[in-house]
Structure formats: structure tokens, C-alpha cells
Amino acid sequence: MNYSKTFQEIYNELQRVEDIGQVANYIPELAHVNPNQFGVHLITVNGEYFAFGDADVKFSIQSIAKVFSFVLAYSRVKSNIWERMDLEPAGTPFNSLVQLEYDKGIPRNPFINAGAIVVCDILVDELASPRENVLSFIRSLTKSSTIDYNPLVAHSEKKSGFRNYALVNLMKAFGNIKNDIEKVMDLYFSICSLEMNCKELSESFLFLANNGIVPHTGEKILSPSRTKRTNALMQTCGFYDEAGQFTFKVGLPGKSGVGGGIVAVHPEKYAIAVWSPRLNKKGNSYKGMLFLEEFTTKTKLSIF
Ligand code: DON
């Protein structure tokens, strides 16, 4: 199947839809992006790939990085990480504080900000040089060596990250953050500032469509059972209070970021990354979601 033609068709259809989304501006550095860029990259477990538009342009992956940090903790940590966070959909925005108070500092899942901050705390304990180790882990999943942090974005978020500081302080008060807050938040803001393009993102998620094994190196990242569970978490929690909509309309496990990127996987088949910077009210890419909905509908390649 040649997906390039399908990409072009869907893109043409979406050109006729007004983009009612807004670029994220609560992190000032993200507001500089050209909002009209659009890229897609799909890669199959057999190594076939299809690119469209700005598939090679790097952007801020933001919350998509939460999958990498979670997988690293899940694969390395001997202790039971589920004592530190839950695995239920939150049903609240990604940066919400309300549930943390009720649940005594235990975040509902690893993909909301609070959960990802706890994962960073675990990685600070577990890894010798967490910042470097996370980066080399992500590079090892792709054929690219140019993936890197953007210190300007990390700094911009740190300066405006009042809600994230509220989350980490609340969790520290409940005893669910073990390390120095600044050390944990430096790692959190760094991973959110990672820049990748759609090609690198689809490549780096392909192990989740391939039973936990990186196809081009044969390296085993997760067992088949943990791969299934990671995909289940993306399905139920990857889009915050829009996880139901994404499942309903697209029908793939996936993860979004406020940089406008979305990655999704079809186990045994493919990984796809889409990038369109304007976000809907839930903080997910407006046209990215529409694109994926059309793609899985036209190709019948959803998991449901
Ligand atoms: O912590 C934040 O608010 C951002 N660095 C990441 C949020 C995000 O990407 C939510 N995703 N759609």
C-alpha cells in the first residue's frame, strides 16, 4: 500500500477546513513557531516509510517525551513504580492540580504532568546522568544523532512553569518526591524541550508496534507484556481529558504534545507521527487529530 497518495488526499481535504486551533503560548518560546507547517511520517515494522510535507522539520515534542521517560523508568527500575503513581485515565487537563490533593500526592497516571514529574524523580534516583541518559536512550531508538534538547525552550518553561512547580511542591509535601525539586524540574523541563521531526518520532516509537524490539537494531527495550501495557496507557491516558475522543475517532494508542505533535502506533503494523502546531482547547493538535481520524478511517488501519 502506498500511503503517500492517501496523505496528499487527506491534506487537500483538510486545507478546506478552517484551523480553529491556537499555538501554545503559555510557554513563551513556543509561540514563535510558524503555525502553518504540517508534516507526517509513517514507518512500518517492515521498514517501509512514507513522508509528507514538513516531515523533516524539527519541533518541540513536549509531552510526547513523557513516553520515553516512562519507558526508561519502566524498563530499568526494580522497585514497584505503581506505588508512586496510578494507571487510570485522569479525565482532567494535563496540568490539573485538583486530583492530587484528593489522592494524597499520587498522580493518576505517568502521562499527565504530575505523573511525568514523579517519573523524573525516579530517573534522578536511578540514572547516573539522567539528562544525558534520556537523550542517548532516545537516540538509540532512531537512526538519527541530531536529536537534542533546546535550552531556550527549557528556560522559557522554567520561568513560566508556575503550575508545574505547584504540582511538584504538592507532591513533595505528600512525600512522593524524594529529590531536590530543582533537580527534578530541570530534568522535566529538559525532556519537554526535546526537538525531533516526524521522521525521528515515528522511528523512535516503532518498538511499541514491534513487541518492544527496535526493528533496525534488534535491541529489546520492553518485554511484549510491558509493551502491551505501555500501549494501553497511551490509549487510555495519552490525550488527557480527550483520550476518549481520540480513541473514538482515531482508534490507536498515541501521545500528544503542546508543540503540536502526535505519535500513534498500530501494534504489529506501523508508527505514525503528525505535526500541526495549532492546538484545540484540550492542548492537542487540532488538524493532527483530524488527519489521523481520516487516515484510520480511509485505510481501516485502526486497532478497533
Ligand atoms: O509541562 C507542560 O505544561 C509542557 N511542558 C508539556 C505539556 C504538554 O505537552 C501537554 N500535551 N498535550
Image (cartoon, rainbow, N blue to C red):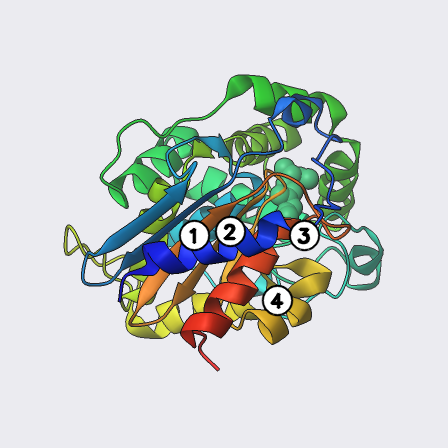
Q: Earlier in the sequence, mark 3 or mark 2?
A: 2
Of the numbered discs 1 and 4, the one sitting upstream in the chain is 1
Would you identify the image quadrant in which residue 78 lies? bottom left
Ligand 1 position by quadrant: top right
Q: Secondary structure at mark 1?
A: helix
> Would you say the residues marked 1 and 2 are in contact, meaning their CB atoms lie under 8 Å apart?
yes
Foreground residue, 142 or 78? 142
Pointers 3 and 2 in contact (C-beta within 8 Å): no
Marks 3 and 1 sit apart, C-alpha to C-alpha, by 15 Å
Task: Give percent across and percent down for residue 298.
Answer: 46, 71
Q: Residues within 10 Å of mark 3 (few under 14, many from 20)?
A: few
Q: Is residue 38 left or right of residue 118?
A: left
Q: CA distance from mark 1 to mark 4?
A: 22 Å
Query: Hey, what amino acid is under mark 4?
Result: Phe
What amino acid is labelled 2 in the image? Tyr
Chain-order first, disc 3 or disc 1: 1
Q: Tell me the element at label 4.
A: helix
> Alpha-carbon distance for marks 2 and 4?
19 Å
Cα gap from disc 3 to disc 2, whole angstroms: 10 Å
Nearer to us in this view, 47 or 115: 47
Residue 201 position, x and y percent, is 39, 45
Observer able to see residue 227:
yes
| Of the two numbered discs 1 and 4 in the rendering, the one whose residue sits closer to the viewer | 1
Q: Which mark is residue 246?
A: 4
Q: Amino acid at mark 3?
A: Val
Q: Position of residue 191 (x, y in %)?
A: 50, 35
Mark 4 nearby-residue class (10 Å; few <14, some 14–19, many ≥20): many
The residue under label 1 is 8
